[in-house]
Amino acid sequence: MPFQHGSARTRQRTVLLVGIVVLLAGLVLAVVLASILTHGRPEGSPEMLKWKDRGTTKNLQEVILGRCYNYVMARRSELGDMDCLKIWESLKQAFIYKNPCNITPEDYQPLMELASHPIPCNKSLFWSKTNDLAHRYTKSNQNFFTLEDTLLGYMADRVSWCGDPSAPGINYESCPKRSECESNPVSVFWKLASKTFAETACGVVQVMLNGSIEAGAFKSSSIFGSIEIFNLNPDKVSAVHIWLMHDIGGPQSESCSGYSIKRLKSILEERNFQITCEDNYRPVQLLQCVHNPDHTDCRLCTSS
């Protein structure tokens, strides 16, 4: 009997020790996996595919979650019921462990459904070759929204990401440029987000173009020219106002009567939109003049 009692105790200790070892191993594995997902491929792992563009933004999860919480809690508190953790997981699942040249719009559809939100009518602002100026304007006049002022655009602006079939499934070293493959994670995301932004526009919409570009203010190959313009809904959008801006002191390569603007107007007319065009829309031009207030273009009054 004493021998059997000792044997039972030994078995209990053995089971306890095995349980502790399994628990510790699980904890170590979890820490290693978390480190890999956060910081990239450990030394000695299989080589990832190599591309010409920068890799995934370091600490991508923290960046996306931080921007998401800031947007729905501070910038637009009426969206506070959106689930930022689900939004991050949906973005990650769109590209992780996938060849970055084989991404499809369907990969991002769950993200679009989770993170899209309506924009007030008459407040959508589209842009092409006026990135800095358009966003300076929406920061000074928060009644207007570019794509980058929506939750989807705000989270992804100037951020890079791509996956890889090998572990850890995210490539922090390089991602493909658009010239290497069209169906890369970032390009597919922005095309679909742009399409969604255009589809939700209503009332009067604005588009800010650059009249100082020698090649023409409107390009059919731009995101606006190839995607957004064709996804505006004539049943929801009543008119398109074109703001044709010129650099202060720079060339005035094209006006509202220019050849590329005529082509844009023709496309819009075919889709039954009313159109207006204004050279150097004054509220936007005043923002340009902040950096060059003494220039003749910036004088409120001129002598006759």
Image (cartoon, grey):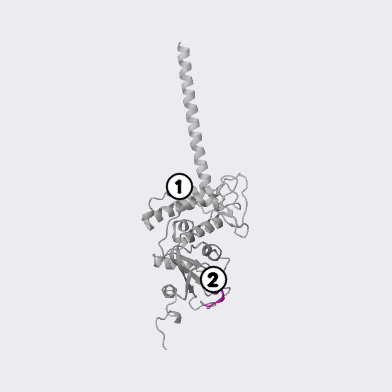
- For the residue marked with disc 1, what is the amino acid? Lys
Q: Position of residue 141 (x, y in %)?
A: 39, 67
Looking at the figure, which quarter contains the C terminus? Answer: bottom left
- For the residue marked with disc 2, what is the amino acid? Leu
Label 1 crowd (10 A; few <14 / some 14-19 / many >=20): some
Whether residue 29 appears in this view of the structure is yes
Q: Which residue is mark 2?
A: 264
Q: Which residue is mark 1?
A: 86
Would you say residue 67 sits in the magenta stretch? no
Q: Magenta part mainly helix, strand or loop?
A: helix
Pick whichever of labels 1 and 2 is earlier in the sequence: 1
Q: Callout 1: helix, strand or loop?
A: helix
- In the image, taking residue 89 as reference, residue 81 lies left or right, namely left
Q: Callout 2: helix, strand or loop?
A: helix
Residue 244 drawn above or below residue 184:
below
Whether residue 59 appears in this view of the structure is no
Looking at the figure, which quarter contains the N terminus? Answer: top left
Q: CA distance from mark 1 to mark 2?
A: 39 Å
Q: Over which residues does the magenta segment extend?
A: 257-262
Label 2 crowd (10 A; few <14 / some 14-19 / many >=20): some
Q: Position of residue 126 (x, y in %)?
A: 48, 66
Would you say residue 260 sits in the magenta stretch? yes
Q: Nearer the viewer, residue 287 or 263?
A: 263
Rendered residue at 53%/73% (across/down): 261
Q: Nearer the viewer, residue 274 or 109?
A: 274
Q: Position of residue 123 (x, y in %)?
A: 42, 65
